[in-house]
Image (spheres, rainbow, N blue to C red):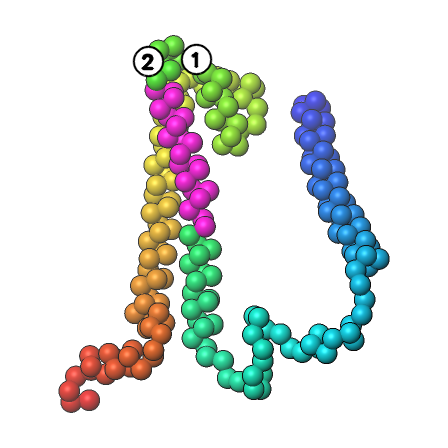
Amino acid sequence: MLLAESTALGSSIGAVATLALFVTIGLVFLFVNLLVGRFVRPHNPDAHPEKGDIYECGEPTIGSSFVQFDLRFYVVALLFIIFDVEVAFFFPWATVFGKSEQLSEMAQVEQAVKGNELSADAKRLYREMGVRDTSVGAVSDLTNEDVYTSSKMLARITLIDIGVFFAVLILGFAYVWKRGDLDWVKAVTEQRRLARLPADE
């Protein structure tokens, strides 16, 4: 019990020390570069009058900067960000699903060839999926049949999970489309709405 607690404490302190070292190296790198830049770069802000001009996207400014910006750009940008971030969640799911399928196939083949003893490759896959120590406890007692059953169950659970997630994502997309937020010209959306209304209104 004490050995397990000291090992856990040691690994926690090691993780914190690694993180602190990483942050320290990053801050030192940042401030050294700023200090070197302060001494190396030229400092003559008034040499050219163009340096004081407003510069936007490589284009010279024309007219006032106080213009009304079309809100449709914001709507499209927000929708892109929302759906882009949601789609990024597919990558960790694909990793877990792929590893569970690979583990089930490996266990099935090894059971047919070697019997029920868990191989080193299966233990490596277990470590990749988050099980740190495959030599102690229940993991060492697992057989290839247990691994096949549990990895197939995990694959089914992940399929159901991503199916629900994707259904919610598609429902949100359909709602946004139905509302007309994807139509660039809102007048077309209004005309469509009026065309669907009964004639007596």
Q: Element under label 1?
A: loop
Q: Report the magenta residues as a range.
A: 88-108
* Residue located beneath label 2 in the image: 112
| Among the 4 quarters of the image, the one containing residue 40 | bottom right
Residue visible at 16% across and 84% down? 198
The local crowd at label 1, few if under 14, some if 14 to 19, many if 20 or more residues have their Cα within 10 Å, is some
The amino acid type found where label 2 is placed reads: Ala
Looking at the image, which is closer to me, 17 or 148? 17
Which residue reaches farthest right?
A: 39
Which residue lies under the disc numbered 1? 117
Is residue 60 located in the magenta-colored stretch of the structure?
A: no
In what quadrant of the picture does the C terminus appear? bottom left
**Residue at the location (35% across, 51% down)?**
166
Place residue 41 in its image quadrant.
bottom right
Q: Amino acid at mark 1?
A: Glu
Tell which circle, 1 or 2, labels the residue nearer the N-terminal end: 2
